[in-house]
Image: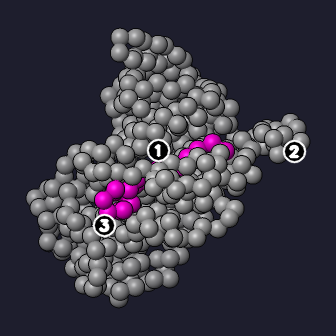
């Protein structure tokens, strides 16, 4: 019989859950994880990682198609859809197995099953092998994640209308595609399939694509995607009519309508938290808009029960869940110097072409707070490394408080900005002002020099434009 009494039990083995478990084990807690599907959760198996494998393929394919610009000659370029998908799945499986190894290394007990609260300090687990276990815990962390939202009339059927899952493992690539929703998930798939040759249409109900990003970034991205051949409709609503092997879509913008027929549709209209069948009824755990309500420490209001990650609300990012998991565990353990998570210090990344990355306040949000601003911008075309890479499109924008020099936000679009954004993440965590950023030596020739130039530009000191 497996031991069933633990200092801490985590329900969900995704990025937040497994990282929380590792940190708990490091702090000497007897730890267990309950996972009903695959270790690593959506991120490793059906989200962050396998999509980046697909996007890497499209990036390489795009470069090959433009080989002549680099003095290279490549003929008869083609692709094998089955092998592309197989590579993506292999990457996902490798990392999922790696998480299993980390559980063993840290002596964390994993229960393969579905968990449900069963009274104070107790958790009933319906094991995948049809047996059952009752676990007792001193502390419980709910990290059950989220799933794709289905809207009436746009419900995914797995064949003609896809969620992200079907979009990652198509039996063949569609020749035409409608993407509903222009957040990170929708835009990444739109970018992937467009680069691989599909005719792609994107519909967004709001007035701009990538609506959480700075308005200048959204506008630049729209122009870039349209230049690539995407059709983009904003302020648009969609109705669908399924055929035998295609979908007829009616797109309405104001009082105008347009009809198109596509092979497949991807519905990327948000997510809902996995809060069902957890036994939350009769507890002090509150659920609002499918997400568990928590305080700054992840506490739910139910004694010794916490929640982290996507199930606990935005931003819906794996790295947010990981950081949150560590914070909650350290708070439970009484580690000194633990700080609540600052959502304004969490970077966001979209791995389309061109890439998009940001942290902190947009210019509009900063102005709405009544702050006096210093705003700097530097274009990729002014950077030697970007030109040498053949990636001259994009810009970096930084926003400072004019009175204090505080870095309020940074917004980027262009090659490799998802790698660059961490520099500003460090700066915000350290509460760096423009003075320290200006005094920092950036290596040459690198894309990171644009980060320096953008800061200089905010204060009228830019050097290379």
Q: Which residue is mark 1?
A: 184
User: 275 or 119: which is nearer to us?
Assistant: 275
The residue positioned 47% from the left and 19% from the top of the image is: 249
Quarter location, residue 340 = bottom left
C-alpha span from label 2 to label 1:
34 Å
Under tag 2, what secondary structure?
A: loop
**Extreme residue in the front direction:** 460
287 inside magenta stretch: no
**Which labelled disc corresponds to residue 341?**
3
Quadrant in which the N terminus appears: bottom left
Relative height, residue 322 to residue 103 (above, below): above
Name the foreground residue: 359 vs 165.
359
Residue 273's disc number: none
Name the disc covering residue 71, or none: 2
Q: Which residues are magenta?
A: 392-411
Q: Secondary structure at mark 3?
A: loop
Q: Give the dominant element type of the magenta stretch: helix, strand or loop.
A: strand
Q: Residues within 10 Å of mark 1 (few under 14, many from 20)?
A: many
Residue 393 magenta-highlighted:
yes
Q: CA distance from mark 2 to mark 3?
A: 48 Å
Residue 198 visible in the current orientation: yes
Residue 256 horizontal/vertical position (percent): 40, 11
């Amino acid at each position: 019989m497996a031991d069933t009494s633990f200092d801490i039990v985590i329900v969900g083995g995704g990025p937040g859950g497994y990282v929380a478990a590792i940190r708990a084990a490091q702090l000497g807690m007897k730890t267990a994880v309950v996972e009903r599907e695959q270790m690593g959760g959506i991120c490793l198996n059906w989200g962050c990682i396998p999509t980046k494998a697909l996007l890497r393929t499209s990036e390489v394919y795009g470069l090959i198609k433009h080989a002549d610009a680099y003095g290279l000659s490549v003929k008869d370029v083609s692709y094998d859809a089955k092998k592309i998908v197989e590579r993506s799945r292999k990457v996902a499986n490798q990392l999922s197995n790696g998480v299993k190894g980390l559980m063993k290394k840290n002596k964390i007990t994993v229960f393969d099953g579905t968990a449900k609260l069963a009274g104070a300090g107790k958790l009933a687990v319906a094991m995948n092998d049809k047996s059952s276990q009752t676990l007792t815990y001193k502390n419980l962390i709910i990290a059950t994640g989220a799933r794709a939202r289905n809207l009436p009339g746009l419900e995914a059927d797995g064949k003609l209308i896809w969620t992200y899952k079907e979009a990652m493992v198509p039996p063949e690539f569609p020749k035409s595609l409608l993407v509903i929703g222009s957040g990170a998930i929708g835009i990444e798939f739109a970018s992937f399939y467009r680069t691989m040759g599909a005719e792609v249409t994107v519909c967004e109900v709001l007035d701009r694509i990538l609506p959480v990003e700075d308005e200048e970034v959204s506008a630049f991205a729209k122009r870039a995607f349209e230049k690539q051949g995407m059709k983009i409709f904003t302020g648009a609503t969609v109705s669908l009519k399924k055929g035998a092997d295609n979908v007829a879509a009616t797109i309405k913008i104001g009082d105008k309508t347009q009809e198109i027929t596509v092979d497949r549709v991807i519905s990327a209209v948000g997510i809902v938290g996995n809060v069902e069948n957890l036994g939350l009824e009769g507890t002090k755990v509150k659920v609002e808009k499918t997400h568990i309500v928590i305080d700054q420490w992840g506490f739910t209001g139910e004694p010794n029960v916490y929640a982290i990650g996507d199930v606990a609300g935005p931003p819906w990012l794996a790295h947010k869940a990981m950081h949150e998991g560590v914070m909650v565990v350290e708070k439970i353990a009484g580690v000194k110097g633990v700080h609540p998570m600052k959502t304004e210090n969490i970077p966001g990344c979209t791995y389309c072409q061109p890439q998009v990355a940001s942290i902190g306040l947009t210019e509009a949000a900063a102005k709405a707070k009544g702050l006096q601003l210093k705003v700097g911008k530097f274009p990729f075309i002014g950077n030697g490394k970007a030109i040498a890479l053949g990636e001259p499109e994009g810009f970096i924008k930084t926003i400072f408080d004019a009175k204090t020099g505080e870095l309020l936000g940074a917004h980027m679009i262009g090659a490799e900005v998802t790698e660059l954004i961490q520099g500003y993440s460090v700066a915000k965590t350290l509460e760096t002002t423009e003075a320290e950023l200006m005094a920092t030596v950036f290596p040459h020739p690198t894309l990171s020099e644009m980060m320096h130039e953008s800061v200089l530009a905010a204060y009228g000191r830019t050097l290379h434009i």
